[in-house]
Image (cartoon, rainbow, N blue to C red):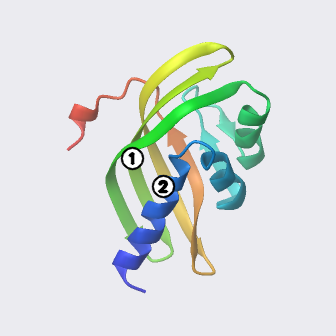
Amino acid sequence: MSSAINEDGIQALIKNFSSVGKNVDVVKTRTTPDFRFIRPSGNPLDAAGFANMFASGDLVMQSIGLSKVHRLDVYGDRAFAAFTQVATFTYKGVPNDDVFTVTALFQKIDGLWYFSWMQRSSGQADSAAWF
């Protein structure tokens, strides 16, 4: 399979993760069993914990979008990406307008790409600092 096809599949996964209403579905269906999402606090969540943040009402997303994919490297059945998202949401009642960077690792299983690890920066990323 060509690198372009691999990158297209990963780009589509990132785009869906960057959409209100799709991000939780992506984490529920397109993550590896050992997936971890590292929050800005440094505390990890598994896929169920990530979904529970939304289901509990702690996190209410008004909007989210993909600003830019800064880097995407594919190494066989593994890949790395760094991308910036913008989001407007409330967390435990506190309003937030964030610009943040996510680093992600991917694994290809049976021809499909899955998130295996994600880490989100704090909400004050400087997009101008990216190369």
The image quarter in which residue 33 lies: bottom right
Q: Residue furthest top?
A: 94
Image quadrant containing the N terminus: bottom left
Using the numbered discs, state the Cα–Cα distance from disc 2 to disc 1 in whole angstroms: 8 Å
Q: Is residue 99 left or right of residue 93?
A: left
- In this view, the mark in front (2 or 1): 2
Q: Residues within 10 Å of mark 2 (few under 14, many from 20)?
A: many
- Label 1 sits on what residue type? Phe
Q: Which element type, helix, strand or loop, lies under badge 1?
A: strand
Q: Residue beneath label 2, please? A: 14
Which amino acid, mark 2?
Ile
Picture quadrant where residue 20 is located: top right
Q: Secondary structure at mark 2?
A: helix
Residue at position x 43%, y 59% in the image? 80
Can you identify the residue that label 1 sits on? Answer: 83
At 70% from the left and 40% from the top, the residue drawn is 50
Q: Position of residue 88 (x, y in %)?
A: 50, 26
Query: Do the numbered discs 2 and 1 sit on residues whose CB atoms are within 8 Å?
Result: yes
| Picture disc at residue 116 | none
Horizontal and vertical percent position of residue 117: 58, 52
User: Height in image: 103 above or below 41?
Assistant: below
Percent x, y of residue 95: 56, 15
Residue 45 visible in the displayed image: yes
